[in-house]
């Protein structure tokens, strides 16, 4: 066997470097490189790679294949995000901040599957069996026929799963605690996580059970031990929410067996996570009714659509001084530009006022697409008339007041529909091959070409 040589692996992005350095060349992260041992590729590797293979069998694309067998968890919000339930032989990664509720939702789902007759194994490397029992008791799941184990050595877990002839679902909480003695690096490092996940996924495919891996998220919001996992699994779900709030959102960012813009909304209670079939109620509850100066922006976070509330407040500048502009969560230069456009192109008088702008919920928006929502909030504050409460806004605004197209209009509209909104104000489609975004059922689209149309 080739000699093992050390290499340095960035724990944030998975890039490797031959020498230790303070900063990762690939992602720019500081102090993220950790030494891990890798099998070196000797000169014999090329020879070993070729030769001795079996011929790959090609088949025609035309033909029929049965849909993959699925096991429903019985939690409709979770099943929807999964694309209809857990797929046999597939691997799902569930990521989220510590304490957000990953173990809770998976214990609930696992219990439901076991009650419905599936064989479910819940393996925890984070909590002792007694702790899990206590949690199950609190969640009212103590009678579920679920098989529990506290284990973290891959060798032991793999040996047990190898014998499992009829497991339906296996939950590993969390992949960062699983380790293999085949590698010198510590549990939770990229090499360990990758090697352990690969073996578990192989077992899932060969034994035909659905595998769920829980993964922690770093402070920066990436799955620790990291992107490589996202490539290996069939679906990646993020469980997110503000700790100060009681709602949690489960979001698919990758799904080989379903759509990636599905979200599931849950409310956190003493008895665990409760599905929220009508999320808009929860979301609008935060909005404090129909007040002037508020508009809902249908934004995108990376590839994920997210709705957020933009709030604007105007108050007379005291003593005729210089008006203040205070912005939280948005670019203040952009606010000044929008105000100038509103005043000189649309005849909206913002007067001798201090202007405060806030993206509610502590979010930070960088997208120009928020222009239209900000403008709507400003106009609403200036005229003291609330924006239509069922509407979302998105679109970029140019210096002449024209409203410009933004990407992913359909994803934004679908998210708005999902969260119960019934109308959307968005940029008019332009001639150059643009097509009107397909509005989901129940959403009325109003296309505008100029900011003045919004004011009118
Ligand atoms: P937990 O599921 O342990 O989070 P994670 O596995 O993501 O780290 O949940 C954290 C704490 O919150 C735990 O003490 C239980 C509590 N909790 C509830 O009381 N109700 C709930 O609905 C959820 C999701 C959590
Ligand atoms: Mg946990």
Image (cartoon, helix red, strand yellow):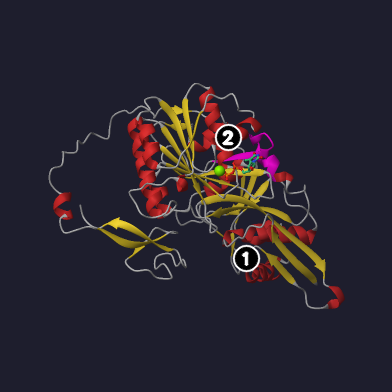
Task: Looking at the picture, tell me which residue is in the foreground, 376 or 187.
Answer: 187
At numbered mark 2, what does the secondary structure look like: helix, strand or loop?
Answer: helix
Q: Which residue is mark 1?
A: 401
Q: Residue at x 32, y 33 (%)?
A: 206
Task: Answer with the quadrant where ligand 1 appears in the image.
Answer: top right
Task: Looking at the picture, tell me which residue is in the foreground, 149 or 200.
Answer: 149
Does residue 345 appear to the left or right of 183 in the view shown? right
Q: Quadrant of residue 375?
A: bottom right
Residue 86, given in percent of the width and then of the height, sits at 46, 32
Q: CA distance from mark 1 to mark 2?
A: 63 Å
Q: Which mark is residue 130?
A: 2
User: Which comes before the other along the chain, label 1 or label 2?
Assistant: 2
Residue 351 visible in the current orientation = no
Q: Residue at x 55, y 54 (%)?
A: 300
In magenta stretch: residue 269: yes
Task: Give the residues in magenta.
Answer: 263-283
Q: Quadrant of residue 256?
A: top left
Front position among marks 1 and 2: 2
Q: Quadrant of residue 367?
A: bottom right
Above-or-below relation of 185 to 69: below
Work out which residue is located at the far top of the displayed protein and give it: 117
Q: Residue at x 63, y 59 (%)?
A: 372
Residue 327, given in percent of the width and then of the height, sits at 69, 66
């Amino acid at each position: 066997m080739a000699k093992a040589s050390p290499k340095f692996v960035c724990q944030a992005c998975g890039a490797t470097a031959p020498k230790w350095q303070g900063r990762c060349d690939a992602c720019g992260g500081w102090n993220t490189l950790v030494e891990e041992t890798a099998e070196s590729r000797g000169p014999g590797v090329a020879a070993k790679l070729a030769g001795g293979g079996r011929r790959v069998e090609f088949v025609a694309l035309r033909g029929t294949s049965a849909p993959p067998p699925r096991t429903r968890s019985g939690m409709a919000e979770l099943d929807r995000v999964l694309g209809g339930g857990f797929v046999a032989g597939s691997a799902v990664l569930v990521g989220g901040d510590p304490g957000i509720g990953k173990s809770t939702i998976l214990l609930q789902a696992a219990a439901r599957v076991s009650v419905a007759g599936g064989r479910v194994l819940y393996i925890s490397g984070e909590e002792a069996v007694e702790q899990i029992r206590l949690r199950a008791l609190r969640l009212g799941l103590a009678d579920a026929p679920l098989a529990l184990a506290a284990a973290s050595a891959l060798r032991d877990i793999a040996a047990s799963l190898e014998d499992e002839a009829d497991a339906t679902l296996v939950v590993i909480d969390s992949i960062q605690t699983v380790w293999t003695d085949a590698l010198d690096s510590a549990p939770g490092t990229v090499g360990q996580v990758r090697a352990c996940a690969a073996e578990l996924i192989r077992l899932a495919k060969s034994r035909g059970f659905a595998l769920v891996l829980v993964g922690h998220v770093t402070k920066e919001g990436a799955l620790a031990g990291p992107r490589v996992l996202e490539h290996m699994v069939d679906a990646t779900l993020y469980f997110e929410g503000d700790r100060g709030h009681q709602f949690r959102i489960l979001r698919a960012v990758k799904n080989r067996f379903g759509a990636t813009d599905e979200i599931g909304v849950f409310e956190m209670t003493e008895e665990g996570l409760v599905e929220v079939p009508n999320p808009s109620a929860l979301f609008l509850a935060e909005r404090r009714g129909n007040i002037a100066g508020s508009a809902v922006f249908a934004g995108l976070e990376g590839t994920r659509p997210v709705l957020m509330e933009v709030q604007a407040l105007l108050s007379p500048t005291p003593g005729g001084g210089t008006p203040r502009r205070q912005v939280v969560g948005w670019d203040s230069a952009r606010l000044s530009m929008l105000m100038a456009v509103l005043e000189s192109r649309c005849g909206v008088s913002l007067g001798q006022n201090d202007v405060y702008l806030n993206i509610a919920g502590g979010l930070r928006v960088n997208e120009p697409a928020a222009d239209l929502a900000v403008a709507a909030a400003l106009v609403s504050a200036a005229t003291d008339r609330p924006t239509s409460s069922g509407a979302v806004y998105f679109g970029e605004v140019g210096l002449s007041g024209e409203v410009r197209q933004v990407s992913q209009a359909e994803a934004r509209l679908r998210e708005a529909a999902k969260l119960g909104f019934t109308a959307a104000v968005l940029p008019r489609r332009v001639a150059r091959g643009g097509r009107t975004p397909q509005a989901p059922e129940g959403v009325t689209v109003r296309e505008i070409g100029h900011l003045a149309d919004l004011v009118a």
